[in-house]
Image: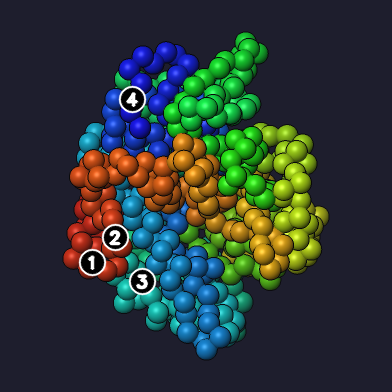
Amino acid sequence: MTSNPTRTESAYDVVLIGGGVMSATLGALLKFLQPDWSIGMFGRLDDVAKESSNAWNNAGTGHAALCELNYTPSRADGTIDISKAVGVNEAFQLSRQFWAYLVESGVIPSPRTFLNPIPHMSFVWGDENSDYLRRRYEALKDHPLFSGMRFSTDPAQLAQWMPLVMEGRTAGTSLAATWIASGTDVNFGALTHLLVNFLSGQPGFDLKLSHEVEDLKQDASGAWRVSVRDLTTNTTVPVAARFVFIGAGGGALPLLQKTGIPESKGVGGFPVSGQFLRCTNPDIIARHHAKVYGKASVGAPPMSVPHLDTRVIDGREGLLFGPYAGFSTKFLKQGSLWDLPKSIRMDNLGAMLAVARDNMPLTRYLVQQVLQSNETRLNALRDFVPNARAEDWELITAGQRVQVIKKDEKKGGVLQFGTEVITGANGTVAALLGASPGASTAVSIMLTVISKCFAGELPRWDTKLKEMIPSYGGPLADRPELCAHVHDWTTRALQLEG
């Protein structure tokens, strides 16, 4: 792709749809790789990072599979499959490297504005779960990406790691936990603002807020004609782009469908909303300093694993518990109730009906979550904070997530958890769908977009990519010396010594 030397205000080399961390990450990577390319970012709200990237719309966990038990399933023979955990951790290491590069380059003045060291813990109770956690620990402890992990069933040790969780707990039930110091809390909203501030200082970048993309069509030349509505003046602005990235969170699916590319056919979305209990008592907040993950309920989606999280937002510590799943037909928190109905088409109807048929436990779970009382929510919290009082917690609504539904030859359709990049065959458009681990692995996901859509540029960009991300091109797990170097470098640069 070559730069357009006669760019006008409505013509760009790259158009980014959505004002979240995904678009900001891709924009920053491309600006470093190809400074002369013009980039337009379009967001329909009046500021960036007001949907899923907002600090209180997600748990802020730097997802590295240090504590998330759904990434380490037990096999039939009792051994633990750590392959997904390793993959998630590898992806997070790419983010850490890019963030460290941004700090050392002066793009991010202080990493503590968006990233803080917070121990990550897994916590279970009951003999069966305790045995599982022990086997998980044994499978991970000697892996270079998980070094430093500790395991204990000793109540005294657990009380040191998580005093709030152990206080008031009835004796007699077997408990187990793992603890690792290298976990992080990430304010993805602050990170998005930092990246967009950097981009806004670069030539050839335009930020257009209160602008909603309504349609996308590819012309005979292969360029995209993007119809954008200026919500301030209620006028339509035509925009031309050589490449379009649809990173609009839950709003990506309808826009992907409007592209008309063959790869969009048969793709649907299932929205899941969420809520958290947020602590309002500073004394309680001060007594907990960890992200503590448990096991999901039977029938619950992976994104509904209960966890008690220390947050650091704008320099202040907070504490939340959840999530409590729910259902809304909106694809965005500030979306429309018509989002889901409008996304149903003849090409994805069969897949969506098959998913509805095959996921009745999930449906029942969501119904139960929607109908649960405040006391039921509080009882779930008391599994983690036995002495929790209703007056110390408030219910907040988190961001909206849209899980991917795809056609399947055997089942008719499958519901997928996680994130997925869908690109057109000619590499001129890409859309990001799905949810967790999402933002934590934004750099890995955007490198996938780059490799799929800019393959011809990669030989030119290889040196710069390896300068920004030393492990680019291969897994750290296979290169122990580089793994150790990257860990030490990013820990120092990102001020994660604790």
- Using residue 250 as the reference point, say whether residue 182 is left or right of it: left
Alpha carbons under labels 1 and 3: distance apart: 20 Å
Discs 1, 3 touching: Cβ within 8 Å? no
In the image, is residue 2 above or below residue 308? above
Q: Position of residue 167 (x, y in %)?
A: 55, 68
Circle 1 sits on which residue?
479
Q: Position of residue 484 (x, y in %)?
A: 22, 63
Q: Residue at x 75, y 66 (%)?
A: 358
Q: Residue at x 22, y 68 (%)?
A: 480
Check disc 3 and give the amino acid type.
Met
Circle 3 sits on which residue?
149
Q: Nearer the viewer, mark 1 or mark 3?
A: 1
Discs 2, 1 touching: Cβ within 8 Å? yes
Mark 1 packing: few (<14 Cα in 10 Å), some, or many (20+)? few
Mark nearer the N terminus (1 vs 3):
3
Circle 2 sits on which residue?
474
Circle 4 sits on which residue?
3
Answer whether residue 359 is visible to the viewer in this image: no
**Helix, strand or loop at disc 1?**
loop
**Helix, strand or loop at disc 4?**
loop
Scheme by which the image is coloured: rainbow
Mark nearer the N terminus (3 vs 2):
3
Q: Between residue 410 and residue 386, name the one nearer to us.
A: 410
**Helix, strand or loop at disc 2?**
loop
In the image, is residue 340 above or below residue 46? below
Q: Nearer the viewer, mark 4 or mark 2?
A: 4
**Helix, strand or loop at disc 3?**
loop
Mark nearer the N terminus (4 vs 2):
4
Q: Residue at x 53, y 82 (%)?
A: 75
